[in-house]
Amino acid sequence: MSKRIVLCLVLFSGVSELAFAADVEWQALPQTAPAPADSPTTSEKVELGKMLFFDTRFSSTGNVSCFSCHNVMEGGDDHRPTSIGVLGQVGGRNAPTVWNAAFNSAQFWDGRAATLEDQAKGPPGNPVEMGMKDLNAVITRIRKISGYQPYFEAFSGKGGSSPSTMPPSGQGVMMKFPLIAGTTYETKHKLTYTAPYFHNGPVKRLDEALRVMGKTRLNKELADTEVADMVAFPSALDDRFLQQTMPRLPPTPGDLLTEN
Ligand code: HEC
């Protein structure tokens, strides 16, 4: 099992599950991410997806891409309490990592997108993220960049799927957070009663995050030595992120950004 996979298991499982770690059979994540039954993963789709991920031209101002908030040159997030989108607008939520997101059982902190395919439709039309009017405006822009055409043709010819026929491949397993209400952490970090994890980005350090989880989910004040052990464990497994290469994007027609 690679070091990073173990790290992800530890961090995603959270403190309450760690309490049962002895009973759990630890398994590596599969090498290949799951794909919808009617849209198998192909190298062409991966290439196209990577281009779109890095392409800033599907934001109203032409300077924000998925990569702006999900820096896959390292942790897959932006290290900000909450993200900044078009026109410097500050959003309300903390950007989670996109590393291994294909293995999540649901997307977003409230699980409102069942699949990655659903999730990807959100950011371009979100006024404080990529700020496009709607998905049609995004499609119009993509069509104007003629260099993308062959990539989309390859997509539709090889198991491309339409959103209406796509079966949901994920199921939300969201827990009320904090489970134990009224702790000092709620006021200290402005944790809202129904919010899971640290969606509003108030906790900067892993040791503090573990203390918050211990108190608000298990009603347990973790001892300094327990916290130190739990911090030391994933830190010891830390590893470098995969080497990334930037994609080459098709050229821009002169009038591309005149409408959004
Ligand atoms: C302006 C910053 C910003 C941009 C641009 C952006 N994201 Fe995000 N992303 C976020 C934030 C903030 C969240 C958490 C939102 C929430 O939970 O409601 C998020 C959540 C996600 C998630 C869910 C991960 C999880 O663990 O639930 C995925 C996947 C994702 N984004 C992929 C993308 C893709 C693909 C794009 C480009 C089409 C994109 N993002 C563009 C900030 C951004």
Image: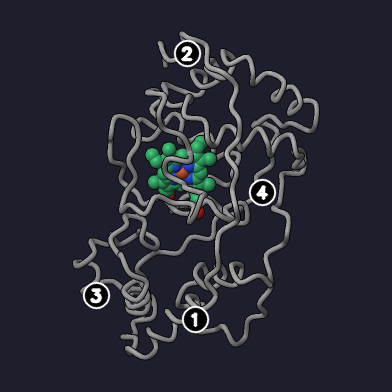
Disc sitting over residue 183 in the figure:
3
Name the foreground residue: 13 vs 232: 232
Residue with the mark numbered 2: 256
Residue with the mark numbered 1: 233
Residue at x 23% of width, y 61% of height? 190
Residue 169 position (above or below residue 153): below
Residue with the mark numbered 4: 169
Residue 203 position (above or below residue 119): below
* Closer to the eye: label 3 or 1: 1
Which quadrant of the figure contains the C terminus? top left
Pointers 3 and 2 in contact (C-beta within 8 Å): no
Question: CB of residue at label 1: within 8 Å of ligand 1?
Answer: no
Residue at x 46% of width, y 8% of height? 255
- Amino acid type indicated by mark 1: Phe
* Closer to the eye: label 4 or 1: 1
* Closer to the eye: label 3 or 2: 2
Query: Considering only order in the chain, which callout, 3 or 4, is on the residue closer to the N terminus?
Result: 4
- Helix or strand or loop: what does disc 3 sit on? loop
- Amino acid type indicated by mark 4: Ser
